[in-house]
Image: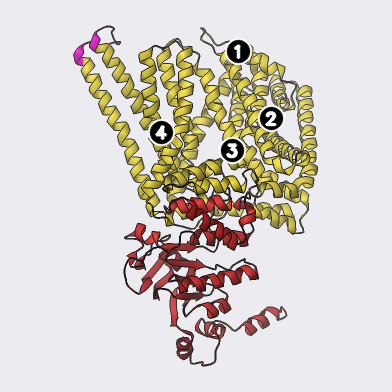
Chain colours: A red, B yellow
């Protein structure tokens, strides 16, 4: 795993991140911290600002204001140091369709200057085997299914052992067995000290994996904390994460919406 | 009134096109407008003037010119518009949506045909201007002008349908596994054949005599005047000649032929739509390298290099992206054709300067073709480079270093062949070699910068991978660097001649002082050309560093 820069216990820190597109504020002053070795859930409805926040944290978007720190390095002021420690998986993984899985992993390993040799090869083979891609040797990534692209995207992060993982819907399109594999893997990685910020719509995954969650709604973080803290904040002691999420990102109740949809047209 | 499915599809396409256009912002739109206006004035105006002059002063060759014009337009469209036709008829996720919807294949075909015509219509506008010029120059009756518009539109329709037929035939009778390669080979080879035949015919027609001799040109067209592509030309020349019966016959022939081709294209497309979507909709799986070979390559120990990673990735991707290769092949035929054309020394220019222009042209052409799309062709993979611990300056440097070798090798090869044919001396070989390297580095840097200044990462076609700002910056940079570099060489050579006092340079006295002045001018021009390249590289780096945005999956 890439060595952290400092002994600080905070691996990911968003400090008042704002992203404006003209008059529209996609992200409006988002702040949170993810301690080292923790899996933190990042939840929000469609268009709430999750992906924009993640992309600011990984350096793909420049914040209008605010700072994004990875292992203590500002991703915009010290990009090379921060990027060397960071792995980001987009909801549509960035892959090269005309490379095979093995060639793609090699490409990524070279980009991150991982020394070539038997050790790197063994790691690559292990990852390909783990994600059941080893028998897709000669097949180009462009011909992969969505789930397979997701797997090769994950493998391309894990081959270089980053200390921080930012994952946007990593189980999206995966079959149940692969989804379980990813969940187990994330727990193992966290136990080994990797920090994970996990954006997902699957609340069961978040509830099972994440020690803490941050809920974003219309560009603002509306709640952060453990399940117990969120329950206390919402005043609902027995509530599930789904109940809390719906309560904190209040909109019309689904029953009301369905009734409206099915109502006869006048 | 309810719309037909074809109308609905077309409306959606036009809306998408409108959004793409308006999404560029007012500044870019204005630039595009200026660019289109200039193109219309210079290219359209030029074609009109040539047509009018031919109509006025070469009445005997009017039929040949019109028939030849229609046939050459068809060839040009067949080769250049081919990728657009493949993309429109067989590529794109929205086609899958149409296949699933209760839409008749004939509606999909009709809508796609009209969309696929867009590139060909642009090309045909040159012929339209030339044909209108011939009409004006010949004093044609009024009916000639609307008829020319209709016949050219029909010709575009027929050629586009022919391209769809060609692809359908390839898909129907060639195994899907090799369909892409066969399609690319058909496009490349037909382009090569037609272009070289055309170029050689022009070389023979315009060899250095007192007057151009059009015998070869006219005899070539006479040999192919029976082709259906020439029929509309015959119809128009019959209208000019006032022969109504003949004109009606040719028009009828052209229209009947058009209907037959369209019907055939529709039937074949209906049968191959799904196969085509499967074959062209995404990259083909390959099984060329065994796992063992790949594993051995990886196991070799050594330091990892991002530069080598990008080089290997580009090489593999380029080799396997047959769609991209098929678009490049016709483009590479042009330098070959022009090399042939330039081998013929002019009466007023010495062979050395012919070689200099050849080196400049080939170097510029190869750089534009290879270097300009090198950064935008990263597509979504560009985000990987942005997230990797490397700077954009390193990315630009890597792309320049990767593009330079093929450009230098090809330019060297062409220039050495030409220099040998012209019987150049050793000193001139050396001068050419230095020029090849200098121009290669400069043009490649300008090309890579142009792509980095205004990249369109979500373009599926390399020809559309650079936006208008990048294109204009590339054009200006190429022109400025090329002119200053060649100008510098000229001043250096003439300065030497002047300083020796060997030969008078027109009204300029041949003295050592004049020679020194020219050398100083050469140095200034050289520094100027380097400054252009450095400025563009700096601009490219700052644009890439500040670039952000989502890149759609293509």
At mark 1, the secondary structure is loop
Mark pair 2, 1: CA separation: 29 Å
Report x, y in % for residue B320: 59, 42
Pair 4/3: label in front: 3
Question: Could you say which disc has been placed on residue B214 in the image?
Answer: 1
Both marks 2 and 3 on one chain: yes
Asked if the residue under mark 1 is in contact with the one under mark 2, i.e. CB atoms within 8 Å, the reply is no
Magenta stretch: give its range. B499-513
Among numbered discs 2 and 3, the one appearing first in the sequence: 2
Residue B159 visible from this viewpoint: yes
Q: Residue at x 55, y 11 (%)?
A: B212
User: Which residue matches tag 4?
Assistant: B443
User: Which residue matches tag 3?
Assistant: B325
Report x, y in % for residue B275: 74, 47
In the rendered view, would you say B109 is above or below B331? below
At mark 2, the secondary structure is loop
Mark pair 4, 2: CA separation: 49 Å
In which quadrant is the N terminus of chain B drawn?
bottom right
- Residue B229 as seen in the image, left or right of residue A149: right
Both marks 3 and 1 on one chain: yes
- Residue B149 as seen in the image, left or right of residue B474: right
Report x, y in % for residue B526: 29, 28
Among numbered discs 3 and 1, the one appearing first in the sequence: 1
Q: Residues within 10 Å of mark 4 (few under 14, many from 20)?
A: many
């Amino acid at each position: 795993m890439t060595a952290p820069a400092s002994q600080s216990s905070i691996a990911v820190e968003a400090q008042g991140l704002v992203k404006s597109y003209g008059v529209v504020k996609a992200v409006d002053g988002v702040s949170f911290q993810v301690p080292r070795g923790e899996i933190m859930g990042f939840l929000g409805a469609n268009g709430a600002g999750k992906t924009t926040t993640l992309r600011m944290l990984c350096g793909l978007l420049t914040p209008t204001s605010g700072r994004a720190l990875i292992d203590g390095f500002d991703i915009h002021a010290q990009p090379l140091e921060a990027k060397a420690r960071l792995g980001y998986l987009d909801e549509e993984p960035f892959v090269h369709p005309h490379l095979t899985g093995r060639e793609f992993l090699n490409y990524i390993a070279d980009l991150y200057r991982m020394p070539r040799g038997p050790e790197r090869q063994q790691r690559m083979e292990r990852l390909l085997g783990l994600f059941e891609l080893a028998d897709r040797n000669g097949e180009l990534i462009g011909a992969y299914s969505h789930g397979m692209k997701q797997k090769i995207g994950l493998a391309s992060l894990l081959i270089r052992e980053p200390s921080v993982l930012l994952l946007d819907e990593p189980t999206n399109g995966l079959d149940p067995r692969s989804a379980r594999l990813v969940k187990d893997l994330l727990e193992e990685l966290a136990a080994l000290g990797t920090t994970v910020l996990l954006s997902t719509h699957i609340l069961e995954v978040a509830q099972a994996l994440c020690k803490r969650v941050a809920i974003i709604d219309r560009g603002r973080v509306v709640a952060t904390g453990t399940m117990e803290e969120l329950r206390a904040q919402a005043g609902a002691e027995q509530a599930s994460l789904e109940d809390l999420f719906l309560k904190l990102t209040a909109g019309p109740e689904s029953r009301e919406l369905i009734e409206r949809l099915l109502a006869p047209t006048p | 009134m309810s719309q037909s499915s074809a109308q609905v599809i077309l409306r959606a396409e036009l809306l998408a096109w409108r959004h793409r256009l308006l999404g560029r912002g007012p500044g870019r739109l204005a630039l595009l407008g200026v660019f289109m206006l200039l193109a219309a004035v210079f290219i359209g105006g030029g074609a009109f003037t040539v047509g009018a002059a031919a109509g006025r002063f070469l009445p005997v060759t009017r039929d040949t010119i019109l028939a030849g014009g229609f046939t050459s337009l068809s060839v040009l469209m067949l080769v250049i518009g081919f990728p657009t036709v493949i993309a429109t008829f067989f590529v794109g996720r929205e086609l899958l949506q149409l296949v699933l919807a209760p839409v008749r294949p004939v509606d999909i075909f009709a809508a796609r045909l009209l969309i696929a015509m867009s590139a060909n219509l642009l090309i045909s506008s040159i012929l339209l201007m030339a044909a209108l010029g011939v009409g004006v120059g010949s004093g044609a009756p009024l009916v000639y002008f609307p008829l020319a518009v209709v016949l050219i539109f029909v010709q575009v329709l027929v050629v586009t349908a022919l391209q769809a037929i060609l692809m359908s035939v390839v898909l129907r009778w060639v195994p899907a596994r090799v369909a892409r390669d066969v399609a690319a080979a058909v496009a490349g080879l037909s382009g090569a054949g037609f272009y070289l035949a055309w170029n050689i015919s022009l070389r023979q027609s315009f060899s250095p005599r007192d007057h151009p001799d059009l015998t070869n040109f006219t005899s070539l067209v006479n040999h192919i005047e029976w082709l259906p592509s020439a029929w509309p030309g015959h119809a128009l020349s019959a209208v000019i000649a006032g022969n109504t019966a003949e004109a009606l016959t040719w028009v009828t022939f052209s229209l009947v032929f058009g209907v037959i081709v369209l019907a055939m294209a529709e039937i074949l497309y209906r049968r191959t739509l799904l196969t085509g979507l499967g074959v062209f909709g995404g990259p083909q799986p390959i099984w060329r390298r065994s796992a063992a070979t790949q594993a051995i390559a990886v196991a070799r120990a050594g330091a990892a290099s991002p530069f080598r990673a990008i080089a290997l990735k580009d090489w593999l991707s380029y080799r396997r992206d047959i769609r991209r290769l098929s678009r490049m092949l016709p483009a590479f035929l042009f330098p070959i054709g022009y090399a042939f054309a330039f081998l013929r020394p002019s009466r007023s220019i010495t062979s050395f300067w012919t070689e200099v222009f050849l080196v400049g042209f080939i170097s510029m052409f190869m750089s534009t073709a290879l270097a300009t799309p090198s950064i935008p062709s990263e597509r979504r993979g560009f985000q990987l480079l942005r997230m990797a611990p490397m700077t954009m300056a390193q990315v630009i440097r890597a792309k320049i270093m990767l593009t330079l070798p093929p450009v230098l090798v090809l330019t060297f090869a062409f220039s050495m062949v030409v220099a040998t044919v012209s019987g150049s001396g050793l000193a001139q070989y050396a001068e050419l070699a230095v020029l090849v390297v200098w121009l290669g580095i400069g043009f490649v840097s300008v090309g890579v910068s142009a792509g980095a200044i205004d990249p369109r990462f979500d373009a599926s076609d390399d020809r559309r991978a650079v936006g208008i700002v990048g294109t204009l910056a590339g054009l200006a940079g190429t022109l400025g660097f090329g002119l200053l570099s060649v100008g510098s060489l000229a001043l250096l050579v003439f300065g030497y001649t002047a300083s020796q006092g060997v030969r008078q340079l027109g009204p300029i006295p041949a003295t050592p002082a004049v020679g020194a002045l020219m050398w100083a001018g050469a140095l200034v021009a050289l520094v100027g050309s380097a400054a252009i390249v450095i400025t563009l590289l700096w601009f490219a780096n700052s644009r890439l560093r500040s670039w952000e945005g989502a890149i759609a999956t293509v």
